[in-house]
Image (cartoon, helix red, strand yellow):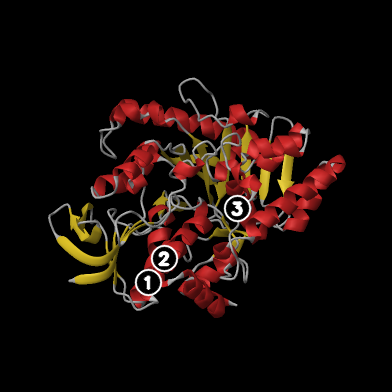
Amino acid sequence: MKYDAIIVGSGIAGMTAAGLLALENRKVLILEQHNIFGGLLQNFRRDRLTFPTGVHSIGSLSENQVLWRYFEYLGVLDRISFVEMDRDGFQEFVFEDTTYEMPTGHKEYAERLMSYFPDERQAIDTFMSDMKICMDRSPYYQIDPERVFARLPMDTMSLQDYLDALTTNLELRCLLAACYPLYGIDPIQCPLVTHFSVLDSFLNSSYRVDEREKAISKAFTFRLKELGVEMRRSTTVDEIICEGRIAKGVRLDDGEVIHGDLVMYSGHPKELVTLCPKLRPAFKWRVAELDNTDPFFSVGLSWSHDVCSSSTKDVFIFDTNDLKKAAQPWKVDTQEVPGILYVAGLPRPERGRYSVVAIAAAYHEDWEKWDSTPTGDRGNEYAEKKLACSEKILRRVRQQWPEAASSIELIDSNTPLTLRDYTLSPFGTGYGVKKTVEKMGMSQIGTMTSVKGLFMIGQSSQLPGIVGTVISSVVACSNIFGADYMLSKIARATS
């Protein structure tokens, strides 16, 4: 059988692209190597609790905001259970001796900053104004085909250089940059536009997903089947078949050949290079030179105390006020605690207990000894090291919330190898390619490739996070149907 489009990977990028294509009456097939659809949208259960794999908070989901409109157009919005985070403090940043709570809403955010730093009004106004200028120009973020993306001088600046020029107040600079664990690039390397895009999205509005009620992955799966999309799991693609420099389909690891007019790949570009030998040598070299964002070590916790503040806000616990030092991945053999610990809980308790995850950037090298071992069979030494790391994080969480300490228990943990095995992400990288200022031109991977009919989608293609990943699929489909047509149709349907 021949398909109009074959999509490799069933994460948010693959499912979004499938929905957009199906709405244009294309015959679509999704191929997923794991036995569960959803990629990082998946959740899993341990000890009768539900834990999210990769989606802990989502921005821009209030009515008429960017992700709300894309989800509405795709027909999944009403199928997902969203719970708004604490508007008065959706993010909490804990430094050595100071805690800051930041609200949603651009005006409210600026006013809170001014209450903390009353002498820095001009710097704060400039920061907010520059963020608005940066985000207002994007036709895909604003869903407006009339907008033209124009380059700005600040596009080539790092977040750190921008903040250094903005203010001499070290505490304000730290706070303005402190959400960078949400995209995995430290302020020294991070392009300013990346930081603005993530922060702006969450300031629009911030939500948790109630994974027990209506999970995103299930909502998309049901909707895509309604649209006639075929979905196959436990199916590994071995090669993208080309005739000359034109994609013609895929070959599976069991030898089956599936023909398609288009192929969209939603994984890491280093895997794409392996699958498609027809890509130009220059692209292969470019991909080989790219750095990855850090992998994660994470723990799943049971929290039975009556109050769980991390269920309504993202909490960032910094071990030091030195952001450069804090940004270094956790060296588990020599550091008692990570430089930064990100803590988030599901919005509602389950049988009197909250599900809470605590996540730290990690070194793949600390776990590469077990690279060639299969999941679930890595031996006692691995299990002991994993448990020792988990207990260090557990102690740090209990220290942060002493009133609930006795109610917090360790349920499960995941190393970088876990994420690698389930998502085929090289070394377990959390946010794909690291798009740094130094390698900005090299790391900006477009959705179109040198092979006709082969498209690259996902967070390594455009911007990190749910919004950036969804936009990558919209851009890819715009390359097929035309940006004016695609954006105008979405705009009319969701205005």
> Mark 2 and mark 3: span between their CA atoms?
20 Å
The dot on residue 184 is none
Q: On the picture, is 253 further left or further right than 437?
A: left
Q: Where is residue 84 in the image (x, y as percent from the top left)?
A: 63, 61
Q: Which of 311 and 478 is in front in this view?
A: 478
Give the amino acid type for the residue marked by disc 2 in the picture: Asn
Q: Which residue is drawn at 52% across and 41% down?
A: 184
Q: Bin the neighbour count of mark 1 within 10 Å (Cα to Cα): few under 14, some 14-19, many 20 and up.
A: many
Q: Is residue 32 above or below residue 161?
A: below
Q: Residue at x 33, y 25 (%)?
A: 381
Residue that label 1 marks:
21
Residue 343 visible in the current orientation: yes
Q: Nearer the viewer, residue 312 or 427?
A: 427
User: Of callouts 2 and 1, which one flags the residue occurring earlier in the amino acid sequence?
Assistant: 1
Give the amino acid type for the residue marked by disc 1 in the picture: Leu
> Mark 3 and mark 1: span between their CA atoms?
30 Å
Residue that label 2 marks:
479
Q: Is residue 216 above or below residue 332?
A: below
Quadrant of the image occupied by residue 258: bottom left
The dot on residue 151 is 3
Quadrant of the image occupied by residue 58: bottom right
Q: Is residue 223 above or below residue 233?
A: below
